[in-house]
């Protein structure tokens, strides 16, 4: 009987520990979400009061990635142009 009682006690302790971890995680998520919400509201108020201002504090807009085949396309275009000019002669 003592073995079962100790197993049940351990399971209850583990359940309580998991419940505390879940509550802590939920609270942290709520705080993070509230922080993002406040930031968004602040930006909306700033836009409403001062208009659209360029915000340089954020990361600059990413450039479009270079075309990996640009050199190949340019070489083909030059080749076609040379062939076209040779045909005219």
Image: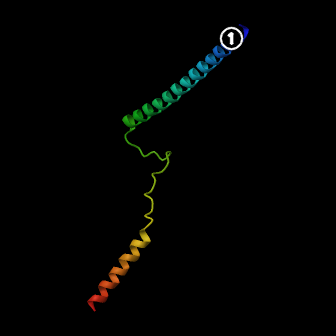
Q: Position of residue 47 (x, y in %)?
A: 39, 37
Residue at the outermost left position: 88
Q: State the image quarter where residue 50 is shown.
A: top left
Label 1 neighbourhood size at 10 Å, few (<14), some (14-19), many (20+)? few
Q: Is residue 69 left or right of residue 80?
A: right
Q: Position of residue 22 (x, y in %)?
A: 57, 22
Q: Is residue 31 left or right of residue 52?
A: right
Seen in the picture, residue 87 relative to 60 is either above or below; the reply is below
Q: Residue at 64% across / 16% down in the picture?
A: 11
Q: Which residue is mark 1?
A: 4
Q: Residue at 29% across / 84% down in the picture?
A: 84
Seen in the picture, residue 67 relative to 76 is either above or below; the reply is above
Please identify the quadrant where the N terminus is shown: top right
Q: How is the image coloured?
A: rainbow
Q: Position of residue 29 (x, y in %)?
A: 53, 27
Please identify the quadrant where the C terminus is shown: bottom left
């Amino acid at each position: 009987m003592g073995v079962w009682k100790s197993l049940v006690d351990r399971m209850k302790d583990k359940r309580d520990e998991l419940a505390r971890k879940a509550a802590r995680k939920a609270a942290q998520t709520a705080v993070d979400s509230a922080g993002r919400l406040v930031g968004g509201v602040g930006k909306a108020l700033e836009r409403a009061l001062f208009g659209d201002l360029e915000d340089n504090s954020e990361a600059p807009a990413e450039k479009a990635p270079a075309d990996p085949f640009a050199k190949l396309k340019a070489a083909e275009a030059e080749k076609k142009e040379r062939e076209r000019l040779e045909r005219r002669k």
